[in-house]
C-alpha cells in the first residue's frame, strides 16, 4: 500500500481519487461482464420471473441480477473502501446473509416471515454489533438524544422499512436501480463535502453507482437476449446499503468524542436524509394508506404503487421512471434550499410534496376521464 501511495504521489494523484475512480470503473465492469453469464445460466435452468397479474412485463425474464450486483459490491467495496469493513465488522456478513435470502426468494419464493426474521438478524447485527444507529432526532417532534434501547429498536425498524420499501418500488424497468444511483450520488457528494474522514463512504457510494450503471445497461435494454431484473436480491442489498449510508449521514452531525475529526451540525439532517430517500418511503406509506382505507391488509399486494399509476396513463417504463426520479429530485432540491429552517417544518414540507407526487398521476387520470 505504501508503494502505491508513493507512486500516486509521484504522479500527483491523491489516493482517494484513485480509489474512487477505480472503484466506479471496476464495479461497473464486474457487473457488466457478469450479467450475460447469469442470464445464460438462468435461461438454461429456467430461473426466470414468470409474468403474473401484478407484473408489468409479458414474458419470462431472468431475475437474478442481484447476484452480479452483490459480486461487484462485495469485491470492489472490500478493496477500495476496506476501512468500512474494519470499522463496521458485520457489514460484509450482512451482505452475505441478504444475498442468500434474496436468491432463495428469487428462486423458490420464501415465506414472508422467514424473510422478515432474516432482515431482523441482519439489521440487529449492524445496529447492535456495529453500532450503526440513529442516536438523535435533532429536535424532531421536540426530541433530541435518544435512549439507547429506543435508538436500537428505531434503527432496526428504519433498516427493515427501507429494505422492503426499495423492494416495493422495483416494479418497472430502471426505477429502483435509477433511484439508488441518484441517492448514492447525493449521499456521496454530501460525504465528500463533509471532510476526508468520510471518504470511505464516498468511495462506497461510487461503487454502488458503478454497479448500478452496469446493471441498468441490461435492465433498460430492449435487446431480449440480455434483459434482466435485479430481483429481491438486488433490491434488498440496495435498500440495506442506502439505509446504512443514510444513518451514517445523520450520525455525522452527532457530537462524538473524536478530537481529530471536524464536526458539523445541521439540525435538519434527518429531514434531508428522508428527502433523499423520499420515493420508497412515500410509495410504501401511500400503498399502506390506500389498502387500510379499502379495508384490506396493508401487506396485501396490489397495483396502487406510483409507477402503476403512471403506466395506467399510458407511459412507458422508461418515461415513468424518468418522471418519477425528476419529481423526487425536485423534492430533494427544495429540502436542500430550505435546509436551515426548523426540522419539523422541513419534514412536513418534504412529506407534503412527496404525497403530491404520489397522487398527481391519479389526479391527471381523473381529469382525463372527465374530459
Image: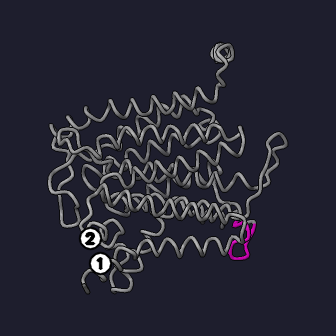
**How is the rendered protein coloured?**
one colour
Q: Which residue lies furthest to the right in this view?
A: 259
Residue numbers of the magenta segment: 137-144
Where disc 1 sits, the SS reads helix
Q: Main secondary structure of the magenta part?
A: strand
Report if residue 92 lies within the magenta region: no
Instruction: Answer with left or right where residue 265 lies relative to residue 40.
Output: right
Location of residue 50 (image quadrant)? bottom left
Instruction: Answer with left or right where residue 199 lies relative to residue 206.
Output: right
Residue 8 drawn at (x, y percent): 64, 17
- The tag on residue 228 is none
Instruction: State if disc 2 and disc 1 touch (CB < 8 Å).
Output: yes
Instruction: Answer with left or right where residue 251 lies relative to residue 213.
Output: right
Give the residue at x 29% y 41%.
Answer: 218
Residue 367 drawn at (x, y percent): 31, 82
Where disc 2 sits, the SS reads loop
Residue 25 drawn at (x, y percent): 46, 30
- The tag on residue 313 is 2
Amino acid at each position: 500500500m505504501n508503494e502505491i501511495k508513493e507512486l500516486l504521489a509521484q504522479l500527483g494523484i491523491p489516493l482517494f481519487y484513485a480509489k474512487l475512480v477505480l472503484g466506479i470503473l471496476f464495479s461497473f465492469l464486474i457487473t457488466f461482464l457478469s450479467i450475460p453469464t447469469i442470464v445464460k445460466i438462468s435461461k438454461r435452468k429456467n430461473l426466470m420471473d414468470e409474468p403474473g397479474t401484478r407484473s408489468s412485463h409479458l414474458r419470462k425474464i431472468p431475475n437474478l441480477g442481484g447476484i452480479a450486483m452483490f459480486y461487484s459490491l462485495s469485491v470492489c467495496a472490500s478493496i477500495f473502501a476496506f476501512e468500512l469493513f474494519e470499522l463496521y465488522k458485520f457489514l460484509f456478513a450482512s451482505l452475505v446473509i441478504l444475498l442468500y435470502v434474496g436468491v432463495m426468494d428469487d428462486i423458490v419464493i420464501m415465506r414472508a416471515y422467514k424473510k422478515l426474521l432474516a432482515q431482523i438478524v441482519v439489521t440487529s447485527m449492524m445496529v447492535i454489533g456495529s453500532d450503526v444507529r440513529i442516536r438523535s432526532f435533532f429536535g424532531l417532534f421536540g426530541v433530541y438524544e435518544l435512549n439507547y434501547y429506543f435508538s436500537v429498536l428505531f434503527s432496526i425498524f428504519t433498516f427493515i422499512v427501507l429494505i422492503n420499501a426499495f423492494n416495493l418500488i422495483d416494479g418497472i424497468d430502471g426505477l429502483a436501480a435509477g433511484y439508488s444511483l441518484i441517492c448514492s450520488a447525493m449521499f456521496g457528494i454530501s460525504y465528500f463535502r463533509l471532510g476526508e474522514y468520510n471518504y470511505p463512504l464516498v468511495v462506497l457510494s461510487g461503487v454502488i453507482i458503478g454497479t448500478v450503471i452496469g446493471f441498468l445497461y441490461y435492465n433498460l435494454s430492449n435487446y431480449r437476449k440480455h434483459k434482466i431484473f435485479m430481483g429481491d436480491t438486488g433490491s434488498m442489498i440496495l435498500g440495506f446499503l442506502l439505509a446504512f449510508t443514510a444513518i451514517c449521514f445523520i450520525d455525522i452531525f452527532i457530537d462524538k468524542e473524536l478530537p481529530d475529526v471536524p464536526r458539523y451540525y445541521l439540525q435538519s439532517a434527518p429531514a434531508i436524509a428522508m428527502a433523499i430517500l423520499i420515493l420508497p418511503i412515500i410509495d410504501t406509506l401511500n400503498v399502506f394508506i390506500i389498502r387500510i382505507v379499502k379495508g384490506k391488509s396493508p401487506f396485501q399486494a396490489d397495483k396502487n404503487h406510483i409507477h402503476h399509476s403512471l403506466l395506467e396513463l399510458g407511459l412507458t417504463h422508461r418515461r415513468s421512471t424518468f418522471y418519477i426520479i425528476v419529481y423526487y429530485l425536485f423534492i430533494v432540491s427544495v429540502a436542500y434550499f430550505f435546509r436551515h429552517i426548523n426540522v419539523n417544518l422541513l419534514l412536513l414540507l418534504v412529506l407534503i410534496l412527496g404525497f403530491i407526487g404520489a397522487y398527481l398521476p391519479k389526479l391527471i387520470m381523473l381529469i382525463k376521464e372527465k374530459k
